[in-house]
Image (tube, rainbow, N blue to C red):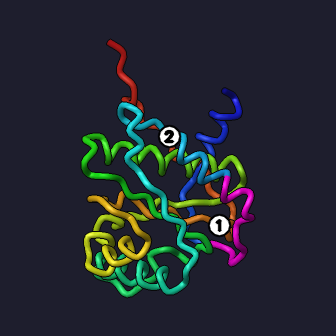
Amino acid sequence: MADTLTTLKTRRSCRAYKPDHVEEEKLKAILEAGTYAATGMGKQSPIILVIKNQEVRRKLTKLNAAAMGMDIDPFYGAPELVVVLANKAIPTYIYDGSLVMGNMMNAAADLGVASCWVHRAREEFESEEGKAILKELGVEGDYEGIGNLILGYAEKSAGAAAPRKANYIYSI
């Protein structure tokens, strides 16, 4: 447990990346960690998209920036982009997808890979362009974007964790 707690205590969101790609073995391990996230009643409502196609990445970048109302790179130049979506027919889909994201971020940290959860995946895949991407992949069903996970190697070391608030835990 000590190693797990160290990983959890030292993981930080990264917003500045080196251009180096994550090694395929590490990327596969991170993705596998996502597939072992707890899901409501074991229904496994999420799916994981690994975006390697640069045209699709450009579309998602544009859709995400538009949802923010800004003309920026919302993925901070990270070399890897992973998207988690979940089947809205499963009542626990948002929680399930969130746990997948958390498992992957913690696995990445354990492997020395930086990450950041970038929101607005819902808006990306509610758009006609987003729906077209899913259709092209053969994804059928009513899926909602839960989060974009960017991965890579950090430009600089992560800072220390903010102190935990005093009233975080209550015992009854």
Which element type, helix, strand or loop, lies under badge 2?
Answer: loop
The crowd level at tag 2 (other Cα within 10 Å; few <14, some 14-19, many 20+) is many
Residue 44, percent across and down?
Answer: 42, 42
Look at the image and say whether residue 27 sits in the magenta stretch: yes
Q: Residue at x 36, y 34 (%)?
A: 40
Which element type, helix, strand or loop, lies under badge 1?
Answer: strand
Mark before the other along the chain sequence, 1 or 2: 2
| Highlighted range, magenta | 17-28
94 vs 119: above or below: above
Q: Any mark on residue 34, and which?
A: none
Quadrant location, the C terminus: top left
Look at the image and say whether residue 135 sits in the magenta stretch: no
Q: Give amino acid for label 2.
A: Ala
Residue 107, percent across and down?
Answer: 63, 47
Q: Any mark on residue 37, and which?
A: 2
Q: Any mark on residue 152, and which?
A: 1
